[in-house]
Amino acid sequence: MNWLWRFLTWGVVFLVVAASAQEKPKKVENDLMYPLTDAVKPYIDFDGAGFSMNGQRTFFSSGSIHYSRVPHELWADRLLRLKQASFAGVETYAFWNFHEVQENQFDFSGDKDFEKFLETAQQMGLYAMVRVGPYVCAEWDSGGYPVWLKFKPPFKVRGDNPAWLSWNDHWYEKILPMVAKHEIDHGGNVVLVQLENEHPLGWGVVTNDPYFVHLNDEAMKFGIDVPHFMSGQHHGAAPTPGNLDPEKRTNPWITTEFWSGWFDTYGSLAEKRNHEIENAIWTILAHGGGGYNFYMLHGGTDFETWNNDEMAASYDDGAAIGQGGDLRPTYYIMKRANQLAQSFPEILANGGDARGDYADFATGTGVKVIGARKSRSGAGTLVFVQNSSSNEITATFKSGEEMKLAQSSVYALPQNVRVTDSVKVVEATLPVLAIARNGETVTLVVYGQPEKTGRVSLSVEGGVKAGMWKGASKNFQTELIDGNRLNLKITIPKNGVEEFKLEQGKQCVRVLALNRDLTAYTWIVGATNRQFVVCGPEFVQGIEENGKKISVTIERPYGQASCGQVAVFGGREQSFHLGVKADLKLDGKAAPELTNWKMSAMREISPAFDDSKWRRSPGPAQMGADGDTSAFAWYRASVNVPSPASGALRLHGADNMEVFVNGRHVTIEKNVARTDFAAGTNSIAVFASHHGRSKAFGYLGTLDNFNNKGLWGSQKLEMDGLRNDIPGWAMRGGVETDLAAIKSWSEIADAKGAPTFYHANFNYMPPGELGAHPILRVNFHGLSRGTMWVNGRDLGRYPEKIKIDSLYIPECWLKAGKNDLTVFDETGQKPSQVELVIEKAASREVIRVSKTVDAKTPMIVPQKSP
């Protein structure tokens, strides 16, 4: 399994560090958080049971979205997908090298506007966890270190030495005040901060090492008042706590990296893995965890050359939200659990272990009671019953009633759970999905297996009388037990939603019953205390009220035959359905055609090329020495030969090299290029590129000879049995200056191995607010390696190292009418097979439907589910 590799890697790193650090502090690993000041506690506080934010208990479910891997025009879209899945927050790293490409030249604009990302999340009602590094790992170029840092006098990173601490503080004094400005106690949304990342010597609270003490001191100096900790907490593929007693802990159990995918993956995960993720999520809820963060929730893209050596352009990660914004099965698994967690924070973020009271709550072959959480504030108990088998089984309750459990599933059953001030769910043999609140109407959503029957027993202070309820039917059979208790015997519909309403003065409790499959497409949307339950669509972008008119904006994925009917439930009289008409013709539309291909070969191979303004040195300088941070560099030198002769160039370094002698391409094998030399001066041109710089996982050494790229060290000419150093090198990094200098393009011809730019056009109409939303990609069939630009924006490196044969084109980078595609291929391979393609799995149609609702609008029972 991929996650086992990471565990093994950590183990090796820890052993190596321990063996080499005889007099250094021992490794400290815990899940503690640094204590809070009294001033911040009204805004955020915590104890062993969970978090309290702005005075309200909150289960902190979040997902990782890196702003650096998403164009800023799409931040709102990706964050909306997170928000609509009932997540409480978003997590991101802050990437040092992304903001300080050149020393002392910080950039926080456009795609780098870190504060704007936080503000966008806050506008959607999302909290934020920020991991400031300076080391971040993240399968990112150099793990976050600026390239220019390796050209400073050598020092060891991530430890207690003056040089490193100075550079650490150089970053901290820039980023920490920004983070502090957006903390919850300052009116922002940042509620958690992680210092460092996956350090071999320190996780949690570390007080025995001056380096970690220094980091905490800096955080406090720059105003980090919210809960913070070192390195991370409980990373893993299925991180699950034991049953937690909140009185024995000082802070909540959380996981900052729940690996829901993996960086070598593209697309949906295997069904078995989804079951593992689902069970792990529910186990965290059942055992008293205070939160989880999925890494990644949306992976995004390594644009330009920000990838590390394990990746190329795509950082899809097999995430719940795909690279193109598509929603995968994992997303709906997460949403179901989040909806429960956000509905019952006084139980799940303020509860104790009550499993001992419910050990025999449900029995049967394969049936397990995996947890029970009882609120410490009297809000009730949720009992978690699991089907641990791969088949549908039957759970038998103490009352003798039975419930069918879907394969590999977990259900939360409410016991004495307060729904309103006067209504409780005394007990239930059907699981609860969520609660939505809309004014004085509270909607309780329960579910089960189709056409199976369960019970929800309600108690009502002040008494229950016949005539107080609406919706009694074959699906909702009522039994009045005494003056204060009403049993609902509920038969789960095969399709659609059944509704029951209990009205008590101005207050209304609505019970919705639906089958388990439909819970995936059931959404809790809208503002606080103005929430709607929407059943049916694959995604709900939003809901708007304009007087009596209610509009719902939904998405239909390409390939889905129909949207069927959409059911909406809001206030007491807001129960209606919407017929949705899909435009299935969109699914068959072809991608735009690339036309008018032209080329421009690079001139650096020519002996006459003027390199007088390049960086010069006796031996070749590493890539990055001239300030360029890309994955490309040119090197030039010359050798004098007294008479024509055969020889060889023995070149040192570079992941990839293309060698040219006197303007002619020379084959190179194992860094040796054999060729003929002319009498006199012979020009040597080497185009070097790299696959990406290492993320430096677990590395604590110096940077000067780490992540070396390009040519460096001894470069030799071998001739007549002698090997002589080749002196006098010129170097220039990057290729974009060449691209910018192109004034005209020529017809495509044989590039003869030279790095070459190719250019084409295509016509396109970008997606509007409504209608078709196709996701375009460009394949790299027939090419070697390189990068591409659309309308001047770099799509990242190809070929991919995962199973995807095309680069994602962000729709926000396209324009109406004529668009430009530029391909840079390192060996000049012709783009004869390159095409634009529509990624059907990520494409969707956006539809808005409306309804005018008044007191005469009938209660409905939709007859179709997706």
Image (cartoon, helix red, strand yellow):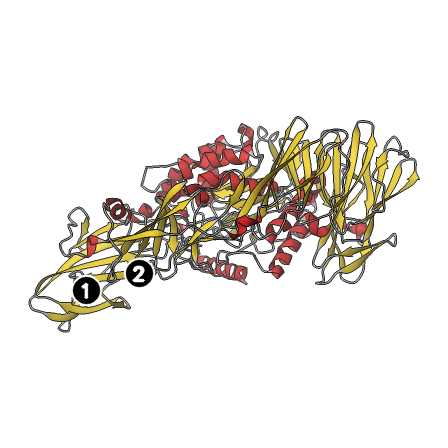
Residue lying at the far bottom in this picture: please name it: 721
Q: Position of residue 127 (x, y in %)?
A: 57, 37
Q: Nearer the viewer, residue 562 or 488?
A: 562
Q: Quadrant of residue 308?
A: bottom left
Task: Tell me if residue 711 can be seen.
Answer: no
Kind of residue indicated by mark 2: Gln
Q: Mark 1 touching mark 2, by CB under 8 A?
A: no
Callout 2: SS: loop
Q: Position of residue 716 (x, y in %)?
A: 19, 64
Which label's residue is closer to the chain start, 1 or 2? 1
The N terminus sits in image quarter? bottom right
Callout 1: SS: strand
Residue lying at the far front in this picture: please name it: 585
Say few, some or many: other residues with alpha carbon within 10 Å of mark 2 (under 14 / 14 to 19 / 20 or more): many
Kind of residue indicated by mark 1: Lys
Q: Position of residue 91 (x, y in %)?
A: 53, 43
Residue 654 appears left or right of 307:
left
Residue positioned 28% across, 59% down in the render:
828
> Disc 1 designates what residue?
716
Residue lying at the far right in this picture: please name it: 482
Q: Quadrant of residue 571?
A: top right
Q: Nearer the viewer, residue 617 or 327?
A: 327
The number of discs equals 2
Point out which mark residue 5 bears: none
Q: Relative to 133, say whether 852 is above or below.
A: above
> Disc 2 designates what residue?
829
Residue 625 appears left or right of 853:
left
Task: Tell me if residue 299 can be seen.
Answer: yes
Q: Nearer the viewer, residue 321 or 368?
A: 321
Q: Nearer the viewer, residue 692 or 535?
A: 535
Residue 265 appears left or right of 46:
left
Q: CA distance from mark 1 to mark 2?
A: 29 Å
